[in-house]
Amino acid sequence: MANAKRYLEVAFWLCTLLPFVLTPSYLSLASQIAITALFALSLDLILGYAGIVSLGHAAFFGVGAYAAGLIAKHYWTEPLSGLLIAGILAGLLGYALSHIVVRFRHLALIMLTMGFGLLLHEAFNSASAITGGADGLQGFRVPGVLGFKFDMFGKTAYAYALGLLFVCFLITRRIIHSPFGLALRGIRENATRMPAIGAPSLSHLRKAYTIAAVVAGLAGAALTHTTSTVSLEVLSFGRSADVLVILILGGAGRLYGGIIGAVIYMVARDQFSGINPQYWYFWIGLLLVAVVMFLPNGILGGLSALYKKRQ
Amino acid sequence: MLWSAVGVLFDGFAYGMLLFLLSVGLSVTLGMMNFVNLAHCTFAAVGGYCTVTVVNRLGWPFLAALPLAFVAGAAASVLLERLLFRRLYRATDLDQCLVTIGVAFMSIAAFAWFYSTEPQSARPPDYLLGSFELMGRNFGVYRIFLAVTGLVITGLLVYSLEQTRFGARIRAAVDNQRMARGLGIDVDRAFLYTFGLGGGLAGLGGALSIEVIGLESTLPLSVILVYVLIVVAVGGLGSIRGSLVAAIVLGITDTAGKYYFPWLGAFLIYLVMVALLMWRPLGLFGKR
């Protein structure tokens, strides 16, 4: 059983290499998917494992994207150091906000996370001298990473995004399976009991929130590096809502939930919005209602329930 | 300076009354069933599109379309409550959020399908447009109409909630649901009526708001939803007085912000909301 799971994981990661061979014309979509999956993974850490509902997670994604963009535009275009700085900046913001966010629950929590996201969106929109306002950041080009040039087919871009996703995934998996990860799940299940048995609940939640912010910042920075633009949309409420939908679709509280959700969502959007971009949201809405009503643990949760039933 | 402040206060008050109509239903349903309904502005859009249809295609007078907008909003909300939302009263906040966002997504696509994504308008009669001058200041007639309508409806709402048997049932259900059930009040039915009333008021607000903020298919998840949520969260769940105060304060702050600090955009509003929520997470008048 444990072995079968391990083979499945290896097979999954081998499958992520398939786009290089099978669909070389869709590599830029594939790198978008990898970045979105990384973003969803970071939300999973706080929502799926720690139980912190957030409607403003794009704040960290956006800060990472803008940090990477500003570094590339004004200082240097070497991406890995930019990635690191973007992650640290997003993490600092996450650490600062975590002191506020972890104290609240229910509606106040949802409103506060949404409020911080909107606040940042407005701030970056207003500070157009630095951020370019509604036009976004343009006029820089990240030539390549580790000596590989970003080519027009997106080969290097996908490799870069996939590599980042894989590394972050391994780190997240290590965190989830550590005693710290177990404590987070305990807090999610019973927030009053965990402090009672001696777990420093709030400080655990603060740590998880900060880590998630770092990962979201890395995802944002990777988007900047692979597209060589930053639009104000990286901070929008729509992006926060999208990533929530993606995670729920795939299954929250499961490491692969965000990744599977991102693949399905992004591929479906690419296919359907080509026909009729306005009506794409009808199907997403319907899917969302159906998943919550009939598949409470997302697609992966449904599959694993089916598998257990058959055994 | 002082006179411009009077104008801003007046416009802000009218805008606040509009926000109150749009949000009071959500406040009561949230307070009663703890149901986080992010699809509330869908009812406003239903009312708005209903008005656009009967005024522009069937040639109804604008004022006659307003009651119809109320009925349309109420019907849409009752339908959704019976079909979908009532299954979610015991679900988690997150599930409620997700399903209602899903409904809002679907409604946006449906409005775009039937009415295109172009902004729609329904022209009020001429005697509601224009403005008159009082001591050197211009006052928009439509704003006065908004303020008066809002005040009349607030009066009716307060009367029916404080003085009638129906109102007593609803207040009991908001304050203590289990106790109310124990006393033989049919809380589910009271809730259905409240939901319909709230949806109807949102529909009316949607119809009245066409002239002020326009009507687009994205209304259900637009900045108006954020404003409605701010009114509810700041005012306190289930509190009509709180919603009224919060809506007027928000309307005046927003209008003043746009007038005096246009470069700040909505930044000021979000800042005020975050600060208020951190200070009082249950809202200004929240009890629980």
Image (spheres, coloured by chain):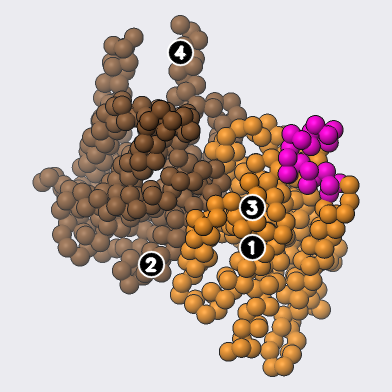
Q: Colour of chain A?
A: brown
Residue type at mark 2: give it: Gly
Horizontal side, residue A257 vs residue A24: left or right? right
Dot 3: within a 10 Å radius of its alpha carbon, few (fewer than 14), some, or many (20 or more) residues?
A: some
Q: Is residue B97 magenta?
A: no
Q: Are marks 2 and 1 in contact (CB under 8 Å)?
A: no
Taking B279 as reference, is B149 above or below it?
below
Residue type at mark 4: give it: Tyr
Q: Which residue is mark 1?
A: B246
- Mark 3, chain letter? B
Residue at the limit of the structure toward the bottom, as seen here: B136
- Mark 4, chain letter? A
Residue type at mark 3: give it: Gly
Residue at the limit of the structure toward the right, as seen here: B164
Residue A149: percent from left, percent from top: 15, 48
Q: Which residue is mark 2?
A: A133
Q: For numbered disc 1, what is the local secondary structure?
A: helix
Q: Which residue is mark 4?
A: A307
Taking A185 as reference, is B248 above or below it?
below
Horizontal side, residue A190 vs residue A173: left or right? right
